[in-house]
Image: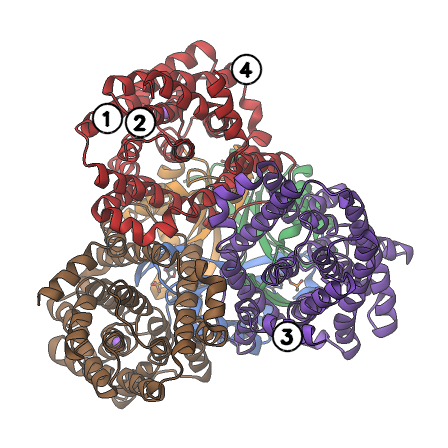
Chain colours: A orange, B blue, C green, D brown, E purple, F red
Amino acid sequence: MQTHQAKRVEITIEAIMQSRLTEALLSADVTGFTVLPVLGGSGRSGAWTRAGEIGRASGMVQVICIVRPEKLDKLLDAAFDVVERHIGVVTIVDCEVLRAERF
Amino acid sequence: MQTHQAKRVEITIEAIMQSRLTEALLSADVTGFTVLPVLGGSGRSGAWTRAGEIGRASGMVQVICIVRPEKLDKLLDAAFDVVERHIGVVTIVDCEVLRAERF
Amino acid sequence: MQTHQAKRVEITIEAIMQSRLTEALLSADVTGFTVLPVLGGSGRSGAWTRAGEIGRASGMVQVICIVRPEKLDKLLDAAFDVVERHIGVVTIVDCEVLRAERF
Amino acid sequence: MEQILSLAATNLLSPIILSFALGVAASLARSDLSVPEAAAKALSIYLLFAIGFKGGVSVSAHGIDVKLGLTLLAGVILSAVLPLIAFALLQVMTRLSRLDAAAVAAHYGSISIVTFVAATSVLESSGIASEGYMVAVAAAMEAPAILSALWLISRSGNGQRMDSTLWREILLNGSIVLLVGAFFIGWATGEEGLEEISSFVVAPFKGVLCLFLLDMGLVAGRGLRERSDVLRPGVLAFGLLMPVIGSLCGLGAGLLLGLSSGGVALLMVLSASASYIAVPAAMRVALPEANPAIYLTLSLGVTFPFNLTLGIPLYVAVATTMTGG
Amino acid sequence: MEQILSLAATNLLSPIILSFALGVAASLARSDLSVPEAAAKALSIYLLFAIGFKGGVSVSAHGIDVKLGLTLLAGVILSAVLPLIAFALLQVMTRLSRLDAAAVAAHYGSISIVTFVAATSVLESSGIASEGYMVAVAAAMEAPAILSALWLISRSGNGQRMDSTLWREILLNGSIVLLVGAFFIGWATGEEGLEEISSFVVAPFKGVLCLFLLDMGLVAGRGLRERSDVLRPGVLAFGLLMPVIGSLCGLGAGLLLGLSSGGVALLMVLSASASYIAVPAAMRVALPEANPAIYLTLSLGVTFPFNLTLGIPLYVAVATTMTGG
Amino acid sequence: MEQILSLAATNLLSPIILSFALGVAASLARSDLSVPEAAAKALSIYLLFAIGFKGGVSVSAHGIDVKLGLTLLAGVILSAVLPLIAFALLQVMTRLSRLDAAAVAAHYGSISIVTFVAATSVLESSGIASEGYMVAVAAAMEAPAILSALWLISRSGNGQRMDSTLWREILLNGSIVLLVGAFFIGWATGEEGLEEISSFVVAPFKGVLCLFLLDMGLVAGRGLRERSDVLRPGVLAFGLLMPVIGSLCGLGAGLLLGLSSGGVALLMVLSASASYIAVPAAMRVALPEANPAIYLTLSLGVTFPFNLTLGIPLYVAVATTMTGG
Ligand SMILES: Nc1ncnc2c1ncn2[C@@H]1O[C@H](COP(=O)(O)O)[C@@H](O)[C@H]1O
Ligand SMILES: Nc1ncnc2c1ncn2[C@@H]1O[C@H](COP(=O)(O)O)[C@@H](O)[C@H]1O
Ligand SMILES: Nc1ncnc2c1ncn2[C@@H]1O[C@H](COP(=O)(O)O)[C@@H](O)[C@H]1O
Ligand code: NA
Ligand code: NA
Ligand code: NA
């Protein structure tokens, strides 16, 4: 089956920042993304779990964007603006996709 | 630690199609997969979130299959049959696995 | 944007083993990880879904660790100790990260 | 007329309708108010169980009516025929493609159980009795419309996938099984069973309905905010006209069957209401190319609120007038 | 005998049992009906809180019985000894490996709190009183069986991991803590506290139990559908025989202790019931090589339905007969 | 004094407080007891809806008080001014950075709706009436404190991001919209509406509150277990002193306004309580560099339990004494 090169960017970020991140993505012409729930985690700012929270302040989500390689830099710039002052992690992986016309 | 080459295929698809996809996978001899919940997303058919849905029609899930490289083509053929007419995204990443006898 | 090489390790494991896994990770100096919920799956020990369970015995989670390449072996040794006798899958992917000072 | 207006006014000022309005308003104002998915599903399980159970108890109290079978049959026929009317109307009133029109038509043949529940609670407040087996009729009306719509499409040469898995999914979908199952439990345990659990299925019912409608309002409002561009004038007009036409078909059938005034009102409500759970799911599988924004916005954003606010009091008033109740 | 049959018939036709049956039937028919995980957990939190609280209130009303300590001790002993009997029986009746047999045995020494809850509701309907502290006995019987099973395995040279973390997890598992905590809250606040919250913990109790058993039925049915191949004749027979043997042990202990007829019945129910939450979790950690399909299917798919439908009325009838109640 | 002690004792032994204590104890003992996120959110939706609705019904019964507007204004002023006092106090009592101090200060100007709910239930048990519109005052006091805190920070030259999105999120956050919406629904439907749904919003209210406080206890206990290192003596002392100071400001305002004794008590409670939902969320966006461990532990782990156990009876006693009620 024919596949195409792409980049898979996964951004783990506070739920409260999600809408700001996706707006930044849209303004960088990244219109496709998928959001996964996160149950808990640990990092420099300590450990947390969804069961230990009241309200939405500290829960996190994972935003996944698959983009053509040439769009990557613009995406990272946009994402960095949002995560810069906040906790969160950004990883980039090389991947292949089916149906490349969608990206 | 000894690791082995494998392919990690992630298929984002409508929840209502999940059982059809996993049946297609089984018929392609792919017996191992993991299903993750999806909170929301955006694509050519617009944006959606789980909080904005009634019923199960438009929610999505992410199905992850780790397979030996030689099984990849058969898997993609099977998956493509199901996603073809539906919305959804398929990515393939090279990975290494522990305990290769399991795949 | 400047990125750095890292390894992305994803461990799918029974929920009941999660705290044992993260403790093993901590003891291997891996202090950063993210836990995703898992809806269901299939493997050598059969298929299961979260909707078909009572209690917490057989649900699974996915633990994601991003580490510098030089820390990988220690991480895998620690993780292997925990998953050895249990069901579960470990994959390793090459990735790039922003803000490498965090890892 | 006066009766209609007063019923409509009482209806509009009930906590139930106002909760729905609150949800719509909150969504339109882009508040982040939301009911967790699991909680919304739990509320719907409660409502289905309670309404089915009470229907069954009522049948056990009044005995089976000879009309039960005929009414079920009438429901199936209504569900199968209404999509044909809807399809024809859509062809005339809108520029939707045949595919989209067929998908929309399927929704209007099928039913909305929450509209039905809201109507029973209006009947109850007004002290109007109805046949307990109407919940079984509601269940019977869910699926036939889907078949009609797929037939419409296959006629025009479009392919679609209707496999046995999909049939099982439609006929044994959770809502139908729960509704019918609870109906039989109520029937089997009767008044005695009701006494055991009435402080669960009767007392808090309306309050639970309020919270459920709050959630429905949030979802409907969100749909209107994000997808209202699909509501071209013709499409919008269809969403308001079709329930009225449906209700008239229900009225005819109900009068022919000689149902009680409450029963006629409920058959009107069922015919007037449009599905937004079972049918959309079936359409995603069988007609994935049809645009969900159209059928969801019409059914949930236009017809549901119309029925809830104006439709139900109208149908009840007409039914009581025509049956001389 | 007549009494048993009539009690069994009433029991079988209660909304509670029929809800369980509906769940099983829906699962076997492969309906997609399901109760969200969060909702099922919320229901179980409600049931544990309510049953613990009411037990505590009853103790506060009747004062502490001198038998409380002895009954707790008896519960612990029963929980520790029943796995030995179960293990011996499994060796004789089935071809399970020692590991699987020990894992199954642990389940039958421990208890099912929902079976207990269902039994209290049968006692209540029949107007049979019982000691309020039986909920504390239920909590005490959860863990000892696990120790016995691990001892059985260690004797046969098999390694297993029993660390202090696991001990804490077992002894402080959420169900035990909530049950015992609510018991003390009920004890401390007494009748006055009950009055404050009785329209929450008493009135809707049976209805909530219906929905919870609907979910249990769905899960049990699913297990039966997918894993019934593990139910070889010998294994199946064990799942039906062991609760009866357990109940007889409970009967003996209850009579020796001089409990009320309700108390004897509940001790029989506890001894007869098998765990499907706490023990499976412990087994996954301590004996990961044991096959969960066997112990889950037996406990949830065979013994639980048996106790719920036939066992409870049988135990209640025997207990009232033997205590002359 | 005696009255305070007796009220405190009754309060401490109510199922509500004991449920909170159970949650804290379970967390500290590292039990895995937990309430699913969706269930906790559903419980809070219920509580907000019920308390708002009942407030509205009470306003519809007693007519609008001329004091409504003034009390709302007083609430806004209190919310805006209390952070300044808190900030000054933190500068004196602790070594927190200006950023952390401002973030903490914002929490103490804003309010905790659960503390308010618990206080209304104490008033009710004691038969003390209060103004129904106090729920509207509660809603009005949520946001102004955030503005004050951001002003404090901007003065010290620190940048922060306060965009229009954040304003909408704060002013239209789900809790405020639901509380105010339910208030208007109650107002519009009045006693009649209350009758329709009172077995939902009134009868089980205290029981639901028990389960909600169980969850709050679990979360608070977990915070204390994991983050108590931030509670240096000065910080801890602030968490106990500030609510008392806040309550005195509320007392002054309430007496000036001439509120009923219940109204004064509730204004004291609102002023004394600290936010742990709306304000933390706003702080994460606007002041991400401030340490959440400090403000969450203080607000949820120190001030909330203090108000729940000792604060409320104290404020009620003082309010009744001072108003001669
Ligand atoms: N090395 C890592 N691997 C995976 N997830 C991480 C890692 N570091 C941080 N995270 C996630 O990012 C969140 C915030 O991290 P931090 O900003 O380091 O406190 C954590 O709670 C984790 O969910
Ligand atoms: N570029 C992308 N990256 C990640 N997820 C995507 C992307 N495009 C689409 N998706 C996911 O697939 C769903 C359907 O996409 P579409 O078929 O383009 O409407 C979206 O709601 C997203 O969850
Ligand atoms: N090849 C695979 N790809 C993805 N997930 C897998 C695979 N094999 C197993 N899993 C996951 O690991 C769980 C246990 O697998 P197993 O130990 O093979 O029974 C399954 O339920 C899946 O969630
Ligand atoms: Na219809
Ligand atoms: Na037992
Ligand atoms: Na305050």
The reply to whether residue E161 is in sight is no
Which element carries disc 1, helix, strand or loop?
helix
Q: Give the residue at x 47% y 20%.
A: F4
Disc sitting over residue E6 in the figure: 3
Q: Give the residue at x 28% y 67%.
A: D115
Residues at discs 1 and 3 both on one chain: no
Whether tag 2 and tag 1 are in contact, CB under 8 A, the answer is: yes
Crowding at label 2, few (<14), some or many (≥20) Cα neighbours within 10 Å?
Answer: many
Amino acid tagged 1: Thr
Residues at discs 2 and 1 both on one chain: yes
Callout in the foreground (4, 2) = 2
Whether tag 2 and tag 3 are in contact, CB under 8 A, the answer is: no
Amino acid tagged 2: Gly
Tag 2 residue: F263
First reached walking from the N terminus: tag 4 or tag 2: 4
Inter-mark Cα distance, 2 to 3: 58 Å
Residues at discs 4 and 2 both on one chain: yes
Amino acid tagged 4: Pro
Image location of residue B93, percent across then percent down: 52, 59
Inter-mark Cα distance, 4 to 1: 36 Å
Image location of residue F33, percent across then percent down: 60, 44
Callout in the foreground (1, 3) = 3
Tag 4 residue: F233
Inter-mark Cα distance, 4 to 2: 34 Å
Q: Which residue is more in the foreground, C60 or B11?
A: C60
Eyeballing the image, is F36 above or below B63?
above
Q: Give the residue at x 42% y 80%.
A: D171
Eyeballing the image, is C25 above or below E16?
above
Inter-mark Cα distance, 4 to 3: 67 Å
First reached walking from the N terminus: tag 2 or tag 1: 1
